[in-house]
Amino acid sequence: MKKINKFDNGMEKLSRVAASKIGRRSFLGKLGAQLAGAALLPLLPVDRRGRLNNAHAETTGSLAREGWKPQDTNSQACDYWRHCSIDGNLCDCCGGSLTNCPPGSKLSPSSWVASCHNPGDGQSYLIAYRDCCGKQTCGRCNCVNTQGELPIYRPEFSNDVVWCFGAEDDSMTYHCTISPIVGKAS
């Protein structure tokens, strides 16, 4: 009981000293600034190299930026040139195509973008990766490629976000990802 009383007495003394030196408005202003600062904490850059190195054993693709060797013949392979920054299941393996969602899934209205080099014509193209949502995860052709990816504080260039928010019927269930070409990259 003595320890609790000491704690209570100490907290009371600390509160009275703070109250005599700090006004309520000043205190609320400082508290608000602290809360706003804490809300900005998730925007700080995050080093995800450890997560990539410990990726699931069935995941294929280039887990590092070095050594990316794109090809232009097999669109169901992780090293296909359009998949330079894809993180997820290829819709091409799940009943869809490079540009269309499989039946029963709905296209997310938002996307992340990357510039990928096509070795066939020597041009670079802007790819707008879009998730197909509303069905359970496909689980086939899972690729984790990070070329051109930026940390989460630049979400339009981050492939670690589930982009199903805002999809029809508010379905947040991820199924697969398409990779349509938006245009030539300059």
Image (cartoon, rainbow, N blue to C red):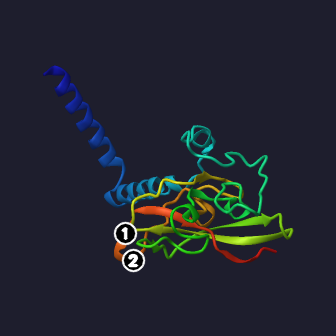
Query: What residue type is disc 2 on?
Result: Glu
Q: Is residue 56 above or below residue 128?
A: above
Query: Residue 24's quadrant in the figure?
Result: bottom left
Q: CA distance from mark 2 to mark 1?
A: 7 Å
Quadrant (top left/top right/bottom left/bottom right) for the N terminus: top left
Q: Residue at x 60, y 74 (%)?
A: 99
Q: Which residue is mark 1?
A: 171
Q: Residue at x 66, y 57 (%)?
A: 149
Given residues 101 and 10, the one toward you in this image is: 101
Where residue 52 sits in the image (x, y, percent)? Answer: 61, 43
Q: Which residue is mark 2?
A: 168
Drawn side of residue 181 relative to residue 69, left or right: left
Q: Badge 1, how many Cα within 10 Å: few under 14, some, many 20+?
A: some
Query: Residue 119's quadrant in the figure?
Result: bottom right
- Contact between marks 2 and 1 (CB within 8 A): the answer is yes
Where residue 37 sits in the image (x, y, percent)? Answer: 48, 55
